[in-house]
Image: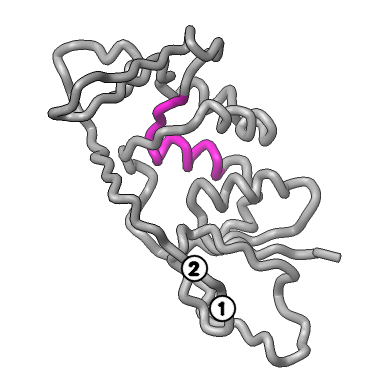
């Protein structure tokens, strides 16, 4: 029986996982020291399906006030013929996805987890699995983007290069974006 869960990573994935556990399990979140994310303006693109998870954990209304819906997606390639344009009319959905700042998403999610369970500037460095002693957790969840280097924890990690790149930046224009992603 799982009694306590330790989540390594206090970003969106770790916080969402903790929020889903809120009423059923005891957990702690180890959030490694980093620069302040309270004003991190990086844009995150959320799938339309993310809304279902946010509704499940009870934060969609607060997030909805902070997102920009994507109603059209324009895809093209420089030097190539043609383009594709997807719209909400094609899918019969309210939005194809959403844009939110990293800080806004984190601030909403942090309110949903138990404050006493969120351990800032904490890392897991070593886990002794050989001794048959009671450990501080029954389940370890790595939610730090594959950055964990914990002695005593071995996992197979594989990466595949797809030769796709994305440029993410904040752009200010003199024309409205009209909820179109390019």
Residue at the (47%, 37%) spot, across then down: 105
Q: Quadrant of the C terminus?
A: top left
Residue at the (48%, 11%) spot, across then down: 90
The relative height of residue 104 versus residue 73 in the rendered view (above or below) is: below
Work out whether residue 41 or residue 132 is closer to the camera in this orientation and state it: 132
Q: Which disc, if any, is residue 157?
A: 2
Given the current orientation, which residue lies at the most extreme right position? 1
Residue at the (69%, 59%) spot, across then down: 27
Residue 137 belongs to magenta span: no
Residue 103 belongs to magenta span: yes
Callout 2 crowding tier (Cα within 10 Å): few <14, some 14–19, many ≥20? few
What is the CA distance from the residue labelled 2 to the residue labelled 1?
A: 9 Å
Would you say 52 lies left or right of 98 here?
A: right
Magenta span of residues: 97-110
Callout 2 secondary element: loop
Callout 1 crowding tier (Cα within 10 Å): few <14, some 14–19, many ≥20? few
Q: Tell me, what colour scheme is on the image?
A: one colour
Where residue 131 sits, quadrant-wise, is bottom right
Q: Main secondary structure of the magenta part?
A: helix
Work out whether residue 111 or residue 168 is closer to the camera in this orientation and state it: 168
Q: Which disc, if any, is residue 154?
A: 1
């Amino acid at each position: 029986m799982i009694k306590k869960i330790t989540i390594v990573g206090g970003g969106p994935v770790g916080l969402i996982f903790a929020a889903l556990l809120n009423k059923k399990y005891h957990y702690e979140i180890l959030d490694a020291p980093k620069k302040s994310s309270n004003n991190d303006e990086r844009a995150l693109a959320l799938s339309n399906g993310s809304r279902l998870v946010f509704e499940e954990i009870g934060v969609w209304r607060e997030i909805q006030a902070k997102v920009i819906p994507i109603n059209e997606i324009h895809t093209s390639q420089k030097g190539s013929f043609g383009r594709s344009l997807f719209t909400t009319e094609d899918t019969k959905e309210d939005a194809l996805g959403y844009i939110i700042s990293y800080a806004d998403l984190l601030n909403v999610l942090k309110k949903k987890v138990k404050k006493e369970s969120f351990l800032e500037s904490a890392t897991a460095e070593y886990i002794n699995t050989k001794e048959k002693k009671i450990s501080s957790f029954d389940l370890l969840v790595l939610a730090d983007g594959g950055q964990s280097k914990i002695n005593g924890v071995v996992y197979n990690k594989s990466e595949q290069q797809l030769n796709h790149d994305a440029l993410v930046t904040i752009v200010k224009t003199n024309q409205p974006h009209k909820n179109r992603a390019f």
